[in-house]
Amino acid sequence: MLESTTPRSAMSTTRRLALAALLLAGSAAPALAQAIENPVAVFSGLDKITGRIITFETAIDETVQFGSLQLTARVCHTRPPTESPNTTSFIEVDELSLDNRLSRVFSGWIFASSPGLNAIEHPVYDIWLIDCRAMPRPPVTTAAEGGPPTAFSGDFGIPPLPPPRPFDL
């Protein structure tokens, strides 16, 4: 049997120092930032038949119809501005059939940085995550809807825009 030439008290001191070094090394690792939950998810959708791309927003737990698909975002997470960007959302996508029955075609996480990673595989439609927002954008009215654009009318203490005056000749 081999005997140690190191005294018992020196051995325990060495072990204590090694343990302390491991604990310090573990505590020096950067802390991961908490995900920021946002109330609005922004998506883009492609209709492969018409080639039309539409950008749309949905509130969390609100169902939005895109063609025959019904999309419901359950959560939408972003990272703080000091971290590398990573926007994720958990969604559920159902397809409405011609006999008005819903069938689940996708349920899972999608990532804005990798839209093809967990894409919604559908023969007619593609949907991908663009961003998450803290607030929905206010609707913009056009002249056809009753006036000039008033996207910021009344917001932040700004009075509404007056109606346009006809010019005199």
Image (tube, grey):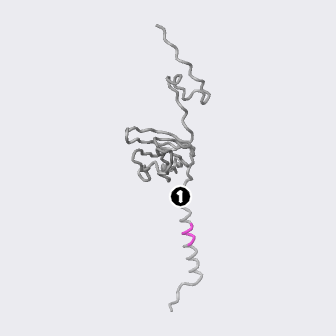
Q: With 135 as the anchor, is 99 left or right in this view?
A: left
In the displayed orientation, state which residue is furthest to the front: 99
The residue under label 1 is which amino acid type? Pro
Q: Is residue 4 above or below residue 13?
A: below
Chain part drawn in magenta: 19-23
SS label for mark 1: loop
The residue at 39%/47% (across/down) is 123
Residue that numbered label 1 is attached to: 30
Farthest-out residue, right:
157
Our reading of the magenta stretch's main secondary structure is helix
Residue drawn where x is 57% and y is 48% of the image = 37
Residue farthest along the top direction in this orientation: 169
Where's residue 52, x and y in %? Answer: 40, 37
53 is higher (above) or lower (below) than 78 = above
Q: Which residue is nearer to you in this view: 137 or 28?
A: 137
**Residue at point 42%, 45% (across, down):** 126
In this view, the residue farthest toward the bottom is 1
Position of 113 with respect to 39 (left or right) is: left
**Measured along the vertical axis of the image, is residue 139 above or below residue 107?**
above
Whole-percent x, y for residue 163 in the image: 55, 18
Choose between 147 and 126: the one closer to the eye: 126
